[in-house]
Image (cartoon, helix red, strand yellow):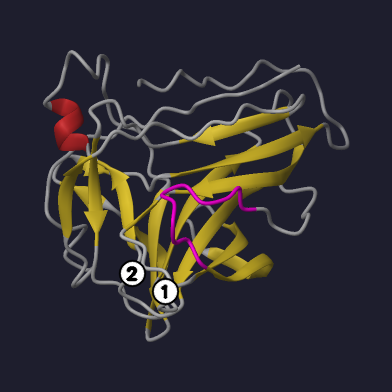
Amino acid sequence: MNRTWFVPVLSLGFALSARADIPNRPSVPVKEAVSPHDRGAASGTCSIVYYNLCSGWLWVWSGWEPGDEVGVVFDLPADCGALPNEVCTNTEFWWYWRYTSPGWGYTITFNLYRVDEDGCKVGASLATIAGYDPSGAHYPGPLVFPEVVDLTGRVAIAATWDKGTLPHLATDNNAKNLAAPVLCPGYSPSPVHSFFYGGPSAPYCPPLDFQDSHGPVQILMDASFECHPGTGTAESSWSAVKTLFR
């Protein structure tokens, strides 16, 4: 059975930077015709999207330095499984980038981590895609980690700037979503899923969430997972997941 789900981004807001503790990371509003990336899913696969692009506006974040790391935390299997104690495998992910520049070494290294309830990384990276060049497309990919099985709890897919500056990070724009009630019916806050982990000289644990003046904003990336019952799994209802407003 196909299980393609969209988890709502129900955050609200407006500002020119994240929190005061995220220095030199300005953001500007950008209008762009972009929608959640969804190629469909194979049987037993779900696709998780936390951002909301109902207004068609983004925040575009700049000022990145080499080693800066951001990530999206996924709750498994709460947002993806049908049964308690299921374990999951990440099958692919897509990350939306702005202002890429080919041939200048502005590459990104992706890592998959286990994280705790605060979003802090637990242990070493489970898988790595090093030196990926996102130039030439806003949604390059699909990106695929070497197979990592039996994921459960909370995991983060994180991106590190190898050279810094470019590409720019994109998040949803809650201020514009709120200003377009016809386009964004039922818009309301959601839990935080997008984080800034800092850089080599100033790592953050807990990591800092991206915000505008109304609350959290979410990084434009989505991931697909295949989940299957683990030991001792019992029947349960699906977790409460609503359709993403478009």
Q: Which amino acid does label 2 sit on?
A: Leu
Asked whether the viewer can see residue 118, the reply is no
What amino acid type is highlighted by mark number 1?
A: Tyr
Residue 46 in the image: above or below residue 128: above
Q: Does dot 2 land on a helix, a strand or a loop?
A: loop
Q: Residue 223, position in %: x, y?
A: 57, 42
Quick check: marks 1 and 2 in contact, CB under 8 Å? yes
Specify few, some or many for label 2: CA neighbours under 10 Å numbering under 14, 14-19, or 20 or more. many
Give left or right: position of 35 versus 146: left
Residue 224, quarter of the rendered image: top right
First in sequence: mark 1 vs mark 2: 1
Q: Residue at x 66, y 35 (%)?
A: 77
Q: Mark 1 points at which residue?
A: 106
- The answer to which quarter of the image holds residue 20 is bottom left
Residue placed at 44% from the left, 51% from the top? 137
Residue 92 is left or right of residue 17, and the answer is right
Residue 164: in magenta span: no
Query: On residue 166, which mark appears?
Result: 2
- Looking at the rendering, the stretch of residues picked out in magenta corresponds to 133-143
**Place of residue 219 in the rendered image (x, y in percent of width and height, measured from the top left):** 38, 48
Tell me, yes or no, if residue 103 can be seen here: yes
The overriding secondary structure of the stretch rendered in magenta is: loop
Q: Is residue 88 rendered to the left or right of residue 6? A: right
